[in-house]
Amino acid sequence: QSEEPEPAPLADGIIYCSEGNPDTFNPQLITSGTTVDATAAQLYDRLIDYDAKQQKFVPALAKRWETLDNGTRYRFYLREGVQFHKTDYFEPTRELTAEDVQFSFNRWLDETSLYHHVGGSYPFFSATGLDQLINKVVKIDEMTVDIVLNNADSSFLANLATDFAIVLSAEYAQKLLVAERPEQIDSLPIGTGPYRFESYRKDILIRYSRHPDYWREGPGIKHLVYSITPNANKRMLKLVTGECDIIPYPLVSELKALNREQLMVTNEVSPNVSFWAFNTQKEPFDDPLVRQALSHAINREAIIQTIYYGNAELAQSILPPTSWAYDDRGIQYQYDPEKARRLLQEADHSSLDITIWAMPVQRVYNPNARRMAELMQSDLAQIGVSARIVSYEWNTFRRRLSRGEHDTVLIGWYADNADPDNFFRPLLSCAAVATGGNRANWCHTGFDQLLYSAIATTNPEERKALYRSAQHLLNQQQPLLPIAHSKRFQAQQKSISGVELPPYGGINFRLATKKPVQEQSQ
Amino acid sequence: MQLLDIRNLTVEMQTPQGVVRVLDKVNLQLSEGEIHSIVGESGSGKSLLAKAIVGFINPNWQVTADRLWWNGQDLLAMTPKQRRHITGRDMAMIFQDPNAYLDPNSTVEQQIIEAIPQGDVRGTFMRRRVDRKTRVKRLLHRVGIRDHESIMDSYPFELSQGIAQKVSIAIAIAHRPRLLIADEPTTAMEPSTRLQIHRLIARLAVSQQMSVVLISQDVASILPETKRLTMLYCGQLMETGPANEVLSEPAHPYTDSMIRMSLQTQQQLPHKARLPTLPGTIPTLRHMPIGCRLGPRCPYAQKTCVKAPVATHERQRVFHCHFPLLDTTP
Amino acid sequence: MPQINLYHHDETPSPLQLVWKSYRARFLSMAALYVLLAMILVVILSPLLAPFNTSAQFSDAIALPPSWVESGNMKYLFGTDDLGRDMLSRLLIGGLYSLGLPILMVAVSSLIGMSIGALAGIDRTIKYQSLSRLFDTLLSIPSFLMALIIIAILGTGFNNVAFAITLSLIPQFIFVTRNAVHEEWHKDYVTASRLNGCSKAYLLYRVILPNVTPTLVMQLTVSLSVAIMDIAALSFLGLGIQAPTPEWGSMLARSLDEVYLSPWSMVLPGVTLFITIMAINIVGDSLRRALKERVNS
Amino acid sequence: MSHLLEVRNLGKTFRSRKGWPWSPKSVAIEPLSFTLEAGEILAVMGETGSGKSTLAQIIGGVATASSGEIWLNGQKVHSKNYSQLCNNIRMIFQDSENSLNAHLTIGKQLEEPLLFNTELSPAERRERVNLTLQRVGMLREHWEFYPHMLSSGQKQRVCIARAIILEPQIVVADEALVALDPSVRAQIINLMLDLQKDMGISYILVTHSPQIVKHIADKILILYRGKMIAFDKTDIVLEDTQQPYVQQLLHEHLKQNIQYNSDRSAKIAD
Amino acid sequence: MTRYLVGRLSVFIIAVFLLTVFSFSLNYLFPGDPITNMTGVRTFQNNYSLVMELRAGDENIAAQYLHYLRHLFAGDWGLSLSNSTPVFADGLQHFMASMELIILALLVAVIFGLPLGVFAATRFRQRSDKAVISLAMMGYSIPVFWLAQLLILLFAIKLGWFPITGQINPLYGVEPQTGSILIDVFLSQSEYKAEALQDALNHIVLPVLILAIMPMMLLLRLMRNATQEMLQKPFVKAARARGLSEWRVLVKHAIPNAVQSVLQQTTLLFSLLLTNSIVVESIFNWPGMGNWLIRSIFERDYPIIQAAVLMFAFVILLFNLLVELYHGWRFPIVRHEQNATD
Ligand SMILES: Nc1ncnc2c1ncn2[C@@H]1O[C@H](COP(=O)(O)OP(=O)(O)OP(=O)(O)O)[C@@H](O)[C@H]1O
Ligand SMILES: Nc1ncnc2c1ncn2[C@@H]1O[C@H](COP(=O)(O)OP(=O)(O)OP(=O)(O)O)[C@@H](O)[C@H]1O
Ligand SMILES: [Mg+2]
Ligand SMILES: [Mg+2]
């Protein structure tokens, strides 16, 4: 049926059916994967990038950098001729300079910065402690910046290469200040990335077009559209009917059953974990015995089979087995309803009424949280715990979650960078309780101690030992039950190429191209 | 030649209780320009007879007749289409409740125009329109409506019963039919309106050279100009003959009691005296007596009445009775 | 009745019996009625009939097709869903929510609506034409929208949904009852009874009620099918009865994710819903037809 | 001595359209007065819309008057006092089809007035109903019948039975004879006359037919657009040649006469 | 007619007035702060006090209502709680999108439903009548969301004829101006207008079809019964007796009168259409009022819920008014009957 050549607008554009609305167009403000997918790699660039294939950091906006003062000062030499986006709401008059870098970092770093309070909080930076780590950002000259740290930190560069450490336009910010519309910086974004912003309609689409003056090799298409499709089934159907070119979190088994030859499904190992977090600041989940009991009650093997269709690995720890700091000590918290019941009795709770909050959206780590909750519901019923499933629209869900309204929640995490620290501090540190990233609201000083010592040293063996004991402690306290490490799937039309799936989250359309089907088959 | 000649018309219908003869061997002759009245109480099959003439009988019912001739042509032998054509051209019918028989959602003008034969108006589009309008006016005048302007634009529900009946007469005579069948056109009307309509029909019969079959329940409400009178009871023909003869010298006991029951003819009855009447009620379809259907109510009935009486011809008159009031011995 | 009839040798059926007689004469009407009654019976007995617990998950029988398919298993007559729960049990128990609950809701709302409607029908204070026109106009807002508003106010959840739909059905009952009673009220036979000095209660229950019964029964069938549709649609949209509860609409909604792997999980609830609604609609339609036949004869 | 029924300045106005408080009122009956004595038949005549039904309805208690009073045997009638009304004034409607409840048996319907206006036991009520049924020429078996099984004449008889079961003094009949067949009409007239003879009932008869009026009415009341333009003994009104309207109403139809050989038919026994 | 018109219009105006009272009271019924529900400005935002003053937040309820009314008619319907966009402007687009769908579905329903109903009536109780009428019964009983799913599987997935979501392929770059996609394509500057129009039509087929089926079946049944009834009426028989052809009798007398009686039941038709449009829009991601309402209920976006309800109710009232006016204008007997009854 697609014999005729497609009309031009369809031939040089790609539709990505994303799973939700972005909260904002500035990834500094949020850790949500949806927002990051929609913005970070498309609109912005970072100082450095991480090349997963070569496993090393590569230059981006900074053409090179050097470490000074025993690792407490980093100097970045900026690339010349980097253009900001030219749109109908902003026309840049200059190229990228050190001022832009300084502004971008000070936005989340410096509380006296005029823009600091515009967006609210900066969860990634506070959870990773980057805002504490960096002392100041110094402009050496027009094209050189220094970042001064309070102490040496082995994860600094890794954090700098994440999707969150992006560079904004200081000139645009200045202009908005004058116009008294500073909040517009996050809704009508200006960056240096391969695509520039065109329009956004909530629940419908985001429209990007190619940045014509991009400083490195740009995309082979003119338009990129995020078609917002929260429903997994609908996303799949749209892929089949050709309304989507690429979809995240496909219903893999369904797609295989459909068996369409113009489609392909790619999968990749991805450092992620899904878990069941207990709100430890609430009765009765403040009692480790209860948490252990509930953990024993869940048949995680069944979950892997029915929810992931076997495309995931049972999680023994919050760290995925691929991580060098992984502690492999056999199966923790075996499915054992008897034991669970016993433990519960020990904790003086023979019957419990709890809520399970289940995400309304699919994520890499959990393709269907609500269904998983249903499974767990019946598991829990066997030990006399009655559970009610709670779900809200995704943004509402997270807002309420960070207010700690939940009893327990099914959620997860995927790593932003290769460092094991990324699994611990954003999720379970005391600092993360404040930013809402700590879904268990679990603050354990001993555990925090371990994490900070692990950060402070650069000796891998030492770090490994520290992380092992952290995992051990976690295992005893059980603020959350790790469930699975899933593969990351993506389904797309075969005509699309060049779409990159960085292992540490996000999606990158920088080199995306679309070829007509016939050409390919020749 | 008779315009309409009906011999032994029988209509049978299927009921859950079996086949019922709703019309039992009815005869009717009608010549050009004649006014013929059919009188009978409810359920006697008067409307059915009228419907049989115009051909609007439920197709599931059995209609048989020795003769059903219109102007020498056999109506029963025709295809429905031919029959409809003849009916539409030569006959017209008006009914008891004129409002129900007028389309509630078209104006009087539209409905009359529809009845005017297409062939009558010629010329250009505009001419035809004007022509039609004048014809409508003329028709309204003819049925005695002077205020044609406002009536033409009215809808049926805006008309009083008398006017509505006049309008339906106007529709009926629009194509100059040779036969007008009036099915109880005045039953539910006030006496003064009834009189008007009666006079109108009589006048039209003369001026348009129409034959008229007038159906009524009551001998009191037949036209004085009536030439012939037919009495029906429960689908059977009781008596037929020249109106003045039948009325002044009824041969059939039923005719006789119908006349006596009508107060109009009972001038000499004392004030508040009991009225003469037939005992009992009209039988329902399901419980028709055999033989002469008047049997159970007839004051003269005897055993022989369980057999249907044969027709007795007496000059112009015909009656079906075993014990006629008229002296038939020659 | 030991008396002998002199004139009529037939029985003396009341008008309602006549309606029933003409209803009974049609095969389709009776078939629909039997289907409906069977459905209701099954729903009432469903806790006994259901072979398994609706939340029991059989990990050895995940997404098993119905038993008539080759790979099916007789143990699970209608197959199992993606979590290994028995479809038959879920459909049966789901009937409690999808058919039983609407019946209950219609019962409650009809009781309330009809009482108010009857009172409004005989009350002479609401006699102004424009006022009643106004009510009629406002009542033309569909019940589904009203249910949505109530849910928006109260939030989702089983009780709220049941309450919302019950409440949203009431106006239709008021409307229909009021009009029917009002219409009858002006008929001569009611006037005659009124002149007999009958009490209002007698007028309402003995005189008017039998005459409006068929209209009300028809409205009951209409409301029932609306209630079933509404609750299923709400659940389908995720605003009604929530997922693990085997309501047919929500079963349908969650089955969409595995249409290709286990098509029966989408077909079965849909077909059940379809048959139920159709049976109710046919019953209502046949009733209307029977009524018309009685009036005509 | 007081009259059986005395109507004083009775008037009725309607709002021409309900719902518009400011809309003009239309007068259905202008204030009129008349009297009726026991055993009399009063005929009310007039063209369509002249207010005959309105008058009948007010006297029958269906509608209330806008002005004026009705006195019965020297007592004032209160329009909503049904028990007073029921025992003295009863009404028969034109449409016998609609004035019977299709869903109740004849017996139940006839029992209704007894139930609410007497203290009879069920057996006594039954007896009374049977008696009344027989009185109007029907059988006790009709107790079990539903209205749809009766002919129109029988229905009208049931209506009359319902009207007389409480042995009232006045029966108001609004065009009760129009829809009947000639033979049935004659039967019903006979029935009404018989009842009057037996029970001394007075009738107020609304009718169009001058023949009936002439035959049975003692007094005639003629309405013209809500005004009473004549009220007197029948023969006086008939002789009155002053008012053309009255003449038109009463006489035009009497002209058309049929010569009828009455000797012959003397054979028919009554 | 004037009296009828005035009567209808005044009823309509009063109904709209009551509607605003209702939607005003919703602000108090919804959880949370009434002023926030009205304006979308949260209590902790710094312009809250200003808004409070503007809306007479601390005066009595009547004053608040008057202010509410003024803002309502000025088109200031507050801001969305979830993304602070003006509700009214947004709502207009959703409104138009819905109307496009609903009106097209209505057209389809009328174009197919009425003639089929007439057809069935002329073949009363014959085989073809029975076939049509059982089909109608089935079409009327099928839950719309299930039907939608089945048709999607058939037409979109199996046959690949139609797309399944949205109004148009977003790559055509048609920005919404009115909300109604066909008009928007027409207004757009795109150089691929023809292709875009075709694509938009392709998108609209399936939702319109699904939305139209139930009303169509309803209309079919109503029309069949009404026509059948009319064919029994004396005036139709009289027309036949006059020798008019069956076709003419049908077209001139039976159908107009049947339409008149069908028009009396349009309330049912609209509520069916609107109810189903909510479901269909959600399934097809059609950016209309229904979709908007459902989403806002999920997000507890009270200003939007209120706006959507207001629009829905207004549409129904307006539809009914228009039908009634047409009814009264085309069929004078309607005016007559309604003036006569009390
Ligand atoms: N459509 C019908 N279905 C069943 N029976 C019918 C039908 N039409 C007429 N009949 C029966 O046929 C008989 C004759 O009916 P018809 O209408 O001719 O009587 P009529 O003399 O015109 O009575 P009326 O004075 O009441 O008009 C009646 O007994 C009637 O019950
Ligand atoms: N309910 C009512 N509302 C308004 N006007 C009414 C009402 N009832 C009667 N009228 C008016 O009162 C007048 C008298 O009506 P009524 O019914 O008494 O006339 P009638 O003499 O019985 O006429 P008919 O001979 O047609 O029965 C008429 O003009 C009528 O329009
Ligand atoms: Mg007749
Ligand atoms: Mg009257």
Image (tube, rainbow, N blue to C red):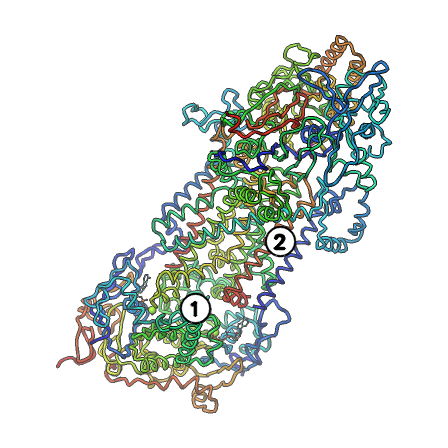
Front residue (pair D4, A96): A96
List the residue tagged with mark 1.
D95
Give the number of the disc on residue E314. 2
Magenta region: which residues?
A392-397
Q: Where is residue E290 in the image (x, y as percent from the top left)?
A: 60, 44
* Among the 4 quarters of the image, the one containing residue A286: top right
Q: In this view, does A69 lie to the left or right of D159?
A: right
Query: How many residues crowd around disc 2 within 10 Å: few (fewer than 14), some, or many (20 or more)?
Result: some
Look at the image and tell me in which quarter the C terminus of chain B lies. bottom left
x, y (%) of residue B89? 31, 70
| Of B236 and C15, the residue lying toward us | B236
Q: What x and y, as percent, mark residue A135?
A: 86, 22
Check disc 1 and give the amino acid type: Asp
Looking at this rendering, what residue extends furthest in the left direction? B330
Which residue is drawn at the image coordinates 62% and 14% (left, top)? A334
Q: Are marks 2 and 1 in contact (CB under 8 Å)?
A: no
**For the residue marked with disc 2, what is the amino acid?**
Phe
> In this view of the protein, which residue sits in the foreground, D232 or A520?
A520
Residue C56 appears in the rendering: no
A209 left or right, relative to A432: left
**Marks 2/1: CA distance?**
44 Å
Task: Write the residue at 85% across / 29% down.
Answer: A110
Q: Nearer the viewer, mark 2 or mark 1?
A: 2
Left or right of residue A406: residue A487? left
